[in-house]
């Protein structure tokens, strides 16, 4: 009897580009693609948490039109970050219904980094909103989150798209969503604010690191968001739409791998290609 692979969804960071995750999730739900676990980092952790908490994705998109984005950013006198993050955490608690991980509909793994110890932290217990708040703490922009004796910042510092985390927690088939480096070559960035300086500096560092783990995904969805700056949160509708289109294009391949035979065939092919590459 053919066994259906356990599907893990790895949602990466990307600041404003991360709204594409909402578009991807909408398509996967509509197409009835099973999602058995989610590993999320930064913006990916937000949408992963909302989905796992049972949020209505269509309603969430409509809420974006009414959400006063500027009021979500409580500016601070710079010490550990430009934004305190208290309002963001309060909004996350509201949208996730203040749930603990044990109350979620599917397993969720939130990726952050302990900035003091320099190590990756995977959170799957306690309050969901608090974990996500740590995962979205972009260094220099949002104040780090103190959590259980650790000082947490954005997980993208070490693993922006948590493919390996999804595999570590049992996924046979990993669908990774990378909203940063897909499609066309990135346009020349116009630096106008301190946010642009920090976000683009981090992106340059992430680009090199991502090359090591993205190929480990079974399906890699990369919405073409090269023309959208990471700080352009006002373009969320466009990002959602582009995420939907990228997901629709990936659905046939996902379906072909949703059997053990299909996944084994892909792994066998990958192994052969890797072996041939070593001999050339």
Image (cartoon, grey):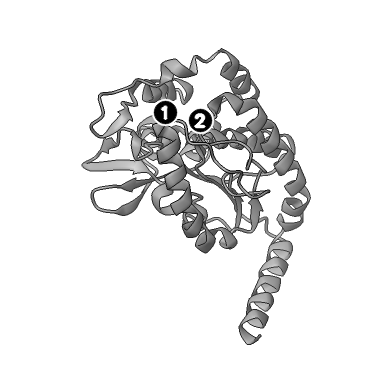
Q: Judge by depth and name the residue closer to the eye, 167 or 261.
A: 167
Element marked by disc 2: loop
Quadrant occupied by the N terminus: bottom right
Horizontal and vertical percent position of residue 109: 45, 45
On the rendered structure, is 113 left or right of 275?
left
Quarter of the view holding residue 29: top right
Q: Judge by depth and name the residue closer to the eye, 237 or 102.
A: 237
Residue with the most extreme bottom position: 279
The residue lying at 34 percent from left, 47 percent from top is 113
Q: Which mark is residue 99?
A: 1
For mark 1, does the 10 Å Cα neighbourhood hold few (<14), some (14 to 19), or many (20 or more) residues? Answer: some
Element marked by disc 1: loop
| Count of numbered marks | 2
Quadrant occupied by the C terminus: bottom right
Horizontal and vertical percent position of residue 65: 60, 16
Q: Is residue 108 visible?
A: no
For mark 2, does the 10 Å Cα neighbourhood hold few (<14), some (14 to 19), or many (20 or more) residues? Answer: many
On the rendered structure, is 233 left or right of 150?
right
On the rendered structure, is 132 left or right of 58?
left
Pointer 1 with pointer 2, Cβ within 8 A: yes
Q: Is residue 24 above or below residue 272?
A: above
Q: Which mark is residue 53?
A: 2
């Amino acid at each position: 009897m053919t066994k259906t692979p356990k599907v893990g969804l790895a949602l990466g960071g990307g600041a404003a580009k991360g709204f594409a995750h909402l578009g991807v999730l909408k398509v996967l739900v509509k197409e009835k693609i099973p999602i058995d676990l989610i590993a999320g980092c930064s913006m990916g952790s937000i949408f992963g948490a909302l989905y796992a908490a049972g949020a209505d994705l269509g309603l969430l998109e409509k809420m974006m039109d009414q959400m006063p984005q500027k009021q979500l950013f409580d500016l601070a006198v710079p010490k550990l970050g430009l934004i305190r993050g208290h309002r963001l955490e309060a909004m996350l608690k509201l949208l996730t219904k203040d749930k603990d991980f044990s109350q979620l509909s599917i397993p969720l793994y939130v990726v952050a980094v302990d900035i003091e110890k320099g190590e990756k932290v995977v959170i799957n217990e306690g309050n969901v909103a608090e974990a996500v708040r740590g995962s979205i703490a972009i260094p220099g922009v949002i104040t780090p989150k103190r959590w259980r004796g650790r000082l947490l910042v954005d997980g993208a510092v070490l693993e922006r798209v948590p493919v390996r985390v999804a595999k570590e927690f049992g996924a046979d088939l990993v669908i990774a969503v990378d909203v940063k480096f897909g499609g066309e070559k990135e346009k020349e960035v116009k630096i106008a604010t301190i946010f642009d300086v920090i976000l683009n500096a981090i992106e340059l560092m992430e680009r090199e690191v991502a090359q090591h783990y993205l190929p480990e995904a079974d399906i890699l969805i990369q919405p073409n968001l090269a023309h959208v700056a990471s700080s352009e949160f006002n373009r969320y509708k466009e990002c959602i739409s582009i995420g939907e289109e990228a997901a629709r294009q990936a659905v046939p391949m996902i379906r072909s791998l949703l059997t053990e035979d299909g996944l084994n065939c892909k792994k066998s092919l990958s192994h052969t290609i890797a072996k041939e590459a070593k001999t050339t």
